[in-house]
Amino acid sequence: MTTTSAPAATLPVYTSQEKRTRIFSIVAASSGNLVEGFDFYIYAFCAIYFAPAFFPKSDQTVQLLNTAGVFAAGFLMRPIGGWFFGRLADRQGRKTAMVVSVLMMCLGSLMIACLPTYASIGAWAPALLILARLLQGLSVGGEYGTTATYMSEVAMRGQRGFFSSFQYVTLIGGQLLASLVVLVLQVLLDEAQLKAWGWRIPFLIGAVTAVIALLLRRTLRETLSTATRASKDAGSMATLLGRHRAAFLTVVGFTAGGSLIFYTFTTYMQKYLVNSAGMSIRTSTNIMTLCLFLYMCMQPLFGALSDRIGRRNNMLLFGALGTLATVPLLTSLQGVTSPVVAGLLITAALAIVSFYTSISGIVKAEMFPPEIRALGVGVAYAVGNALFGGSAEYVALYLKSIGHEQSFYWYVTGMILIAFLVSLRLPRQAAYLRHDH
């Protein structure tokens, strides 16, 4: 298990051409991550508009609860996706897995864009919505592990934290783009039009942009050697849960808290500002658009910080600050009336989350040898993410519906405390990845 970059004295010297090649590879790999992020999170941002089309016989909170349940269902497919694409990436190569995953996400988004409503086909409408989300969940379950693995293998030593942070730059960029698209649609269309048909437009945009990611990813060079792919341990769950069980459980542990707080202050926050703080949909969208932009810009800064102070210290700062600040921040946001104050509070929360998100991919990838790296990262991340991250909205809305919204704040705090305790297990000493290209 390794958590920091190698000492400067032993860092290799890269030629200008090698640097350009590695940087282009990171851009090409992360471009698909942006598309995946956009397609997956546009669902969360548009749920307020299309919820009545699939769940018409409910009040607003119950409609959002139903769409959040479908959102969480997509996360339940992530462990399967993490296993399938992790095995594919470790046995057939990272490039193949990344191309297949972005195509699958495209298909899921296209399905949602074209789905008939409850008024047209009755209960088949929400059933098909769930099917499309399961397909997307399968894709995203594989996307994280393969992209994190690939980026960790092409990033230059001594700057791995900085370059690996672009996985979340593009993931957040996808969320930001989703928010911007919704914002533009809110300006061009009235609420009735958005609820009738306007919500379909972002899903079509996501399907089309996947073609660009596909073209870029086809140019990637493979980082996994033929010999490694042919290893009997390549993509083996038995090897992962046998010799590398401790690393697997560590990743699950800090993914649970990290994913939960990430989704709380990103995808769920728009609904929280509307449903709990009483702000208008447009105001909440404006706030989240700005906050997501600032959050995206933070990632390289916090990633570069990890190259200086070590991944372990980044993770410990995330756990400590998140444990202390989550309840005060969410409590303050519940009663906030000023959009400026709301924006400042959310930005402060996202700064804390950045200690984790900027380096989460590289920390996880550094724990596993190359023959099971994509599988180890993908499955461990997907399990923690599915159980805690994907259920964040559903749990929050359920607790609100029964009058115990404050309990959610303490639930998030408790999971971040677990992430802090698990991070104490990360080693202090720097070391190289077991395998580098």
Image (spheres, rainbow, N blue to C red):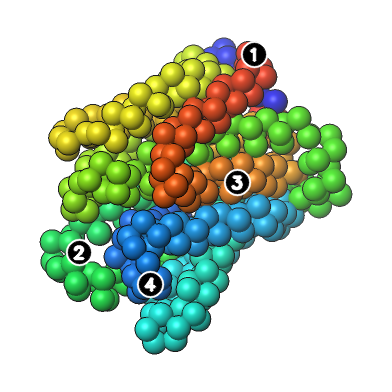
Q: Quadrant of the N terminus?
A: top right
Q: Is residue 329 visible?
A: yes
Q: Nearer the viewer, mark 1 or mark 4?
A: 4
Q: Residue furthest front?
A: 403
Q: Which residue is mark 2?
A: 185
Q: Nearer the viewer, mark 3 or mark 2?
A: 3
**Where's residue 167, x and y in %?**
46, 42
Q: Nearer the viewer, mark 1 or mark 3?
A: 3
Q: Which residue is mark 3?
A: 387
Amino acid identity at mark 1: Gln
Q: Which residue is mark 4?
A: 57
Q: CA distance from mark 2 to mark 1?
A: 50 Å
Q: Residues within 10 Å of mark 4 (few under 14, many from 20)?
A: few
Q: Nearer the viewer, mark 3 or mark 4?
A: 4
Q: Is residue 255 left or right of residue 250?
A: left
Q: Is residue 314 visible?
A: no
As helix, strand or loop, the secondary structure at mark 4 comes to: loop
Q: CA distance from mark 3 to mark 4?
A: 28 Å
